[in-house]
Each structure stands twice: as C-alpha cells, then as structure tokens.
Image: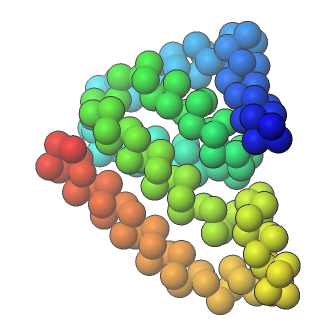
Amino acid sequence: MPAVLCIALAASIKYVFEEGRVLPIIVDNINRFTNGQEPLLNALCIFLIVLVLEFFISSSTAKALLVMGILGMVDTGFSKPMSVLLYTFGDGYTNVLFPTSPVLLISLAMLDVEYFRWVKKSSLFFLLTFLVVVGFICLGIAVGY
C-alpha cells in the first residue's frame, strides 16, 4: 500500500502540469526550438533537459510520466526508442551524482562518506561516463536507432 501511495503522489506532478495548462506550453516551446534542427542537436538537448529535470524531480516514476508525455507529443526528428534511451541515460546517470537523490544520500550516510568528498573523488568517473553516454547518443542518431 505505501508503494501505491508513492506512485500516486509521483503521478500528481503530471496532473498538475496538465490541469495548469503548463504541458502544452512546454511542448509548443520544445517544438519551436527543435523545428528544423539536426536530430543530433535535438537529442543532446533532450538529454540535457532530462538531466536538469532529474535535479528537481528525483522520482523516476514522476519524471517518466512527465518526460515521456512530453516526448510523445514533440517532433524531434528521431525515433521513439531513441527518446526512451535519452530518458534512460539522463535518469540513470544522475542517480549517483545529484544530491537530490535519496538513495545516494542514504548510501553515503551508511558508508560515512561526505557528499562533496564523493563528488571530488568520483568527478573523473562522472566526466568519462558523461562522454561515453554522449558518444552512444551520437552513435544512436547516426545508425537511426
């Protein structure tokens, strides 16, 4: 029962966006920005949008409802599986980086490691992972995934 309550609360974010008429404005602005752009530029922008949203919405369920709803309506020039891949990359990458991730903070507290020490020691790994992810995004767009 507690899991159902958490999922319902996470789903409320999309409800607020729809009832507040915020979702159509976001979709319209993204469509204006992506219109006529290269699919690779669009893919990288969507990836960065997911990264930014991850900082503010740590719930993967709420973010999936919101982002997939937006990406389903946006004409980006690449396939829907690529949209899902971009979301997955953005969501997974930041779970071990952003201080808004409860799992990260709990894990660091259990190990008695300060957050800033974790970031400092892991920054090279985060940078390499980011570059590998961007490489896979470029590869996905190049092969038409």
Q: Position of residue 6 (x, y in %)?
A: 78, 38
Q: Is residue 13 visible?
A: no
In the image shown, does 112 or 129 lie closer to the viewer?
Answer: 112
Q: Position of residue 41 (x, y in %)?
A: 34, 44
Q: Is residue 51 left or right of residue 128?
A: right
For the N terminus, which image quadrant?
A: top right
Q: How many marks?
A: 0
Which image quadrant is residue 3 in?
top right
Colour theme:
rainbow
Q: In percent of the image, x 60 and y 30: which residue is there?
A: 66
For the C terminus, which image quadrant?
A: top left
Q: Position of residue 100 (x, y in %)?
A: 77, 58
In the image shown, does 123 or 19 lie closer to the viewer?
Answer: 19
Which image quadrant is residue 94 in?
bottom right
Q: Position of residue 26 (x, y in %)?
A: 58, 22
Q: Is residue 54 visible?
A: yes
In the image shown, does 24 or 92 lie closer to the viewer?
Answer: 92
Q: In percent of the image, x 70 and y 45: which residue is there?
A: 59
Q: Is residue 127 left or right of residue 42?
A: right
Q: Residue furthest front?
A: 1
Q: In percent of the image, x 54 and y 75: which residue is there?
A: 126
Q: In percent of the image, x 69 and y 80: which residue is there?
A: 119
